[in-house]
Image (cartoon, grey):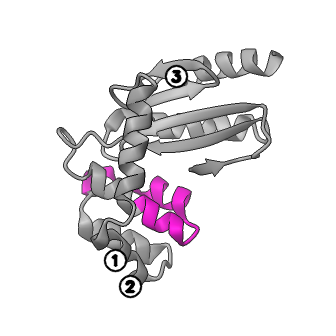
Amino acid sequence: DHIYGNLKAKVTLVEFSDVQCPFCQKNHATIKQIIEKYKGQVRWVVKNFPLEQIHPYARMGALAAECAGEQGKYFEYLGKLFENQPKLGKDMMVDTAKQLKLDEGKFKSCLDSEKYLPKVLNDIKEGEASGVSGTPGNFIGDIFLGGAYPFDEFARIIDEELQK
């Protein structure tokens, strides 16, 4: 899994996300705010949940982010996918890898081979088993937030979790 923040943080926020989902784009920005405000207190775990039936580049985007992660740039790459969501496509994904100074040959080989497809499919199964049916799907501890919630709602739950 891709984990951002303090591995020993008291609160874990798990996000099931689709890089082509506009609500996930909003959710991503909110979670970045959360991580900044609760520095050291919250760790963020990202799971893939591409909704391929409505987002044709979601799976490729998930695979591309995983390939970027192989070179230590998962979160930077994921952020770029959300920033450039209207331009999603293979050329954009390869160009983004170049911008982040990833090894282009390794990246393309990884993406073309769908090396991380088993991981992506496992994330989907895990999400479905946890009750996720759409994106974004967030868990703060055992509390489920289905959809893009405002910062204040995340903060309220995190504050409660920190008090436990």
Q: Is residue 84 visible in the rendered structure shown here?
A: no
Residue 18 location, x and y as percent?
A: 36, 42
**23 in magenta:** no
Rendered view: 122 above or below 156 = below
**72 in magenta:** yes
Quarter of the view holding residue 111: bottom left
At x 61% / y 25%, what residue is drawn? 140
Earlier along the polypeptide chain: callout 3 or callout 2? 2
Which secondary structure class fits the magenta region best?
Answer: helix
At x 19% / y 49%, what residue is drawn? 56
Looking at numbered disc 3 in the image, what kind of residue is underneath it?
A: Pro
Disc 3, SS = loop
Residue 156 location, x and y as percent?
A: 67, 16
Quarter of the view holding residue 25: top left
Residue 46 lies left or right of residue 83; in this view the side is right
Pointer 2: what residue? Answer: 105
At x 34% / y 57%, what residue is drawn? 117
Task: Give the CA distance from mark 3 to mark 2.
Answer: 40 Å
Q: Is residue 149 visible in the rendered structure shown here?
A: yes
Looking at numbered disc 1 in the image, what kind of residue is underneath it?
A: Lys
Could you say which is closer to the camera, residue 38 or residue 64? 64
User: Label 3: how many residues lie within 10 Å, few (<14), some (14-19) or many (20+)?
Assistant: few
**Mark 3 touching mark 1, by CB under 8 A?**
no
Looking at numbered disc 2 in the image, what kind of residue is underneath it?
A: Gly
Residue 139 location, x and y as percent?
A: 55, 26
Labelled disc at residue 108: 1
Pointer 3: what residue? Answer: 150
Labelled disc at residue 12: none
Residue 93 location, x and y as percent?
A: 33, 66
**Mark 1 touching mark 2, by CB under 8 A?**
yes
Region rendered in magenta: 65-87
